[in-house]
Image: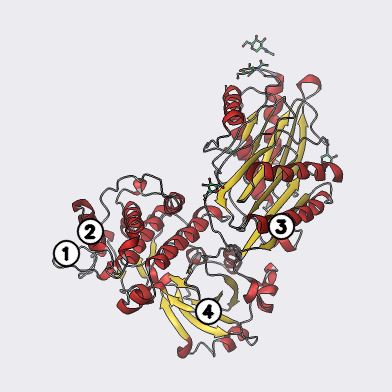
């Protein structure tokens, strides 16, 4: 069944060159033979796949196993990306094997590619045999502005990495690297082969994949080219563990994202190349910041052990945590500005004690948060653990936080024109998307608000304070201790302590409406309206007077975009959690001009504004609230 569907879509593509989107990882069911459900082959295959996913001895991410004898023998290969951990590899192999059996329920030969691993099986001998077909291609739909300049950087980068990957060992043929491209972009690329190939075979497979780029997807910002024996991908953002760039040791990263599109393919026809597609989320254009802030300190950090920074050094940097250096204070602790002796400016967060977490767990969490790197996130440089002190050291972001601009009538009129505001909204959405879906772990921020959005010298937004909930060991979806801020908390979280990515989406929606109106949700009052910004926005939306919401200093030439953002904001703050979009859809909505958005339903109103919400009566317990700082709610377990 699935074969015929694939063949159909293949033809479709062949003749119409149209990109298809499936919300699935790419796979192919080959028509080289079927098995029946009671066959020995089927039993062998099950044993084989189970033995791969449960194998705990292999730590290099490549499995070449077989089971059974003679014509009933099943052979399988699984290959993980060289930057993910053994554990992630195993779970990816397990998941992809299950999916593959499901998609190809009776074909003896099949293959599937996830973002971080590939699984393939056959009744034929597949070990040590180079197979470069079917070759499929996916591309990032975004165009590069300077195609020639981009290709001038891309080609040598791919050549260099191909040679490096091909010359790898019999357990690992993997290379990643990056190079600076025009427009301040950096191209990141990842190339790998199944390591059972010899050097020449690997190189040939990757060469063939690379040769396909101009035929398929010239001028695109990214693409992935996959064949049974090799995999090549490049993007203008970092999509692999940067630690894999410098070391050849194991790193980690990413979930297997639903890449969306795929394409099709025949089998049997070794000569045919196929292509198409579309996909990947539309993400960050310029990835990591330039390396200017790479000081000795940061260099040292690339080594996980040296993430630890001496207490004495931090003490000196912050002038013994002097009040003059205090940048702010929140539910997580106090933040100080500091400067290392080499001149590097830092922000130090001194966590309030009281987390039940052990030192080792804390260090593990830091190592995780340190790996979260995205241009819309403030970078964590290191930490310090001394006695009961737990300190986090971040890069210092020069401009103040968004609240200093957006809620200031003069600054918002002078500095935050609509283009800047739109860029800020987009940047926040991308940073959040990275936290929710693209980082190695799903990170729920839980305290997204204007004062947690820092602005760099170019007014690009950087989300701060992410991962702090993890660092305080509050990783469950239902928590006794609520950390969040008055005005931004989703009702299910404020009232029941239940948090999810959708509670972050809610806070994002509030932020969007604040950015558009220049008004603070928690202190919004308009005439008789004491229900706050959300209710005001909703009322005007329903009455067709939504322009009442828009900051009068914004130029009317951007009305369409502003209206789209109000629409998105209202979708995000809907009371019905399931109806709120994911941040991935938000990013898509922001980057597309032709999507039809769904109609928002009623938002959640928590009685914000002039009166304090009486949440305590709903949560049966004490509650400390400060207006602008994170609010710490102590809930007793229901
Ligand atoms: C294998 O099974 C599929 C249906 O699952 C069918 O379309 C195909 O013709 C079969 N192939 C052979 C060689 O029997
Ligand atoms: C498997 O079942 C089919 C009928 O479904 C039967 O014809 C065949 O002989 C069985 N094969 C084995 C190996 O038991
Ligand atoms: C593989 O995944 C299945 C569910 O998809 C799970 O039940 C099973 O425990 C996993 N096996 C291993 C070895 O992780
Ligand atoms: C990229 O360029 C092609 C034509 O070269 C155009 O059809 C397409 O719409 C552009 N895509 C984007 C996302 O701008
Ligand atoms: C499996 O792969 C390893 C490492 O590449 C290799 O040494 C071994 O010979 C392979 N086994 C088979 C059966 O091909």
Quadrant assignment, res 332: bottom left
Which one is in front in this view, the residue at disc 1 or the one at disc 4? 1
State if disc 1 and disc 2 touch (CB < 8 Å).
Answer: yes
| Residue placed under numbered mark 4 in the picture | 347
Residue drawn where x is 75% and y is 25% of the image = 123
| Residue placed under numbered mark 2 in the picture | 535
Which one is in front in this view, the residue at disc 4 or the one at disc 3? 3
Please provide percent x and percent y for residue 4.
59, 22
Q: Is residue 346 above or below residue 183?
A: below
Residue drawn where x is 81% and y is 47% of the image = 171
Q: Residue furthest left?
A: 528
Q: Quadrant of the N terminus?
A: top right
Task: Describe the element under mark 1 as helix, strand or loop.
Answer: loop
The residues bearing labels 4 and 3 have C-alpha atoms spaced at a distance of 39 Å
| Residue placed under numbered mark 3 in the picture | 152
| Residue placed under numbered mark 1 in the picture | 529
Ligand 3 quadrant in view: top right
Give the left or right position of residue 530, taking residue 9 as reference: left
Give the left or right position of residue 447, taking residue 203 as reference: left
The residues bearing labels 1 and 4 have C-alpha atoms spaced at a distance of 39 Å
Q: Earlier in the sequence, mark 4 or mark 3?
A: 3
Q: Which of the colour schemes (rainbow, by chain, secondary structure, one colour) is used?
A: secondary structure
Please provide percent x and percent y for residue 16.
57, 31
The residues bearing labels 2 and 1 have C-alpha atoms spaced at a distance of 8 Å
Task: Describe the element under mark 2 as helix, strand or loop.
Answer: helix
Task: Describe the element under mark 4 as helix, strand or loop.
Answer: strand
Which one is in front in this view, the residue at disc 2 or the one at disc 4? 2
């Amino acid at each position: 069944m699935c074969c015929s569907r694939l063949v159909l879509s293949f033809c479709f593509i062949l003749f119409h060159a149209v990109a298809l989107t499936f919300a699935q990882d790419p796979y192919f069911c080959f028509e080289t033979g079927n098995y029946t459900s009671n066959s020995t082959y089927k039993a062998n295959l099950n044993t084989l796949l189970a033995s791969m996913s449960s194998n705990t001895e292999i730590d290099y991410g490549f499995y070449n196993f077989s089971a059974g004898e003679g014509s009933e023998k099943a052979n399988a290969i699984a290959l993980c990306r060289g930057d993910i951990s053994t554990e992630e590899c195993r779970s990816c192999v397990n998941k992809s094997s299950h999916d593959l059996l499901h998609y190809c329920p009776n074909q003896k030969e099949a293959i599937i590619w996830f973002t971080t691993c590939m699984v393939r099986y056959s009744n034929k001998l597949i070990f040590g045999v180079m197979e470069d077909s079917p070759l499929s291609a996916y591309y990032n739909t975004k165009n590069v502005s300077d195609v020639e300049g981009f290709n001038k950087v891309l080609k040598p980068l791919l050549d260099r990495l191909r040679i490096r990957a091909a010359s790898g060992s019999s357990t690992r043929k993997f290379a990643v690297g990056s190079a600076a491209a025009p427009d301040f972009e950096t191209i990141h690329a990842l190339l790998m082969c199944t390591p059972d190939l010899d050097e020449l075979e690997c190189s040939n497979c990757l060469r063939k994949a690379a040769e396909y780029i101009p035929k398929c997807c010239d001028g695109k910002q990214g693409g992935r080219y996959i064949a049974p024996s090799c995999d090549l991908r490049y993007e203008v953002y970092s999509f692999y563990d940067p630690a894999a760039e410098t070391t050849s040791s194991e790193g980690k990263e990413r979930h297997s994202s639903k890449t969306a599109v795929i394409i099709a393919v025949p089998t049997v026809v070794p000569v045919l190349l196929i292509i198409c597609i579309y996909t990947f989320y539309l993400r960050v254009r310029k990835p990591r910041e330039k390396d200017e802030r790479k000081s000795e300190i940061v260099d040292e950090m690339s080594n996980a052990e040296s993430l630890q920074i001496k207490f004495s050094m931090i003490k000196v940097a912050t002038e013994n945590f002097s009040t003059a250096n205090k940048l702010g204070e929140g539910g997580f602790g106090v933040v100080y500005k500091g400067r290392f002796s080499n001149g590097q400016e830092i922000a130090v967060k001194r966590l309030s004690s009281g987390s039940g977490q052990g030192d080792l767990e804390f260090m593990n969490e830091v190592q995780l948060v340190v790996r979260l790197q995205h241009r819309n996130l403030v970078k964590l440089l290191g930490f310090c653990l001394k006695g009961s002190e737990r300190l986090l050291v971040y890069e210092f972001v020069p401009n103040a936080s968004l609240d200093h601009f957006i809620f200031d009538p003069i600054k918002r009129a002078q500095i935050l024109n609509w283009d800047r505001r739109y860029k800020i909204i987009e940047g926040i959405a991308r940073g959040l998307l990275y936290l929710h879906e693209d980082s190695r772990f799903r990170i729920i921020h839980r305290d997204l608000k204007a004062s947690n959005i820092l602005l760099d010298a170019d007014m690009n937004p950087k989300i701060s304070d992410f991962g702090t909930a993890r660092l305080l060991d509050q990783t469950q979806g239902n928590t006794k201790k609520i950390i969040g801020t008055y005005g931004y908390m989703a009702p299910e979280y404020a009232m029941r302590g239940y948090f999810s990515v959708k509670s972050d989406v809610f806070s994002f929606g509030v932020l969007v409406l604040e950015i558009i109106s220049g008004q603070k949700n928690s202190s919004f009052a308009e005439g008789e309206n004491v229900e706050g910004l959300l209710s005001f926005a909703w009322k005007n939306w329903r009455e067709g007077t939504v322009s009442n919401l828009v900051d009068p200093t914004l130029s009317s030439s951007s009305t369409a975009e502003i209206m789209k953002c109000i629409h998105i904001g209202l979708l995000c703050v809907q009371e019905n959690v399931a109806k709120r979009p994911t941040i991935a859809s938000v990013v898509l909505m922001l980057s597309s001009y032709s999507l039809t958005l769904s109609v928002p339903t009623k938002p959640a109103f928590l009685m914000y504004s002039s009166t304090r919400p009486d949440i305590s009566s709903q949560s049966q317990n004490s509650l400390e609230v400060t207006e602008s700082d994170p609010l710490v709610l102590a809930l007793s377990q229901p």
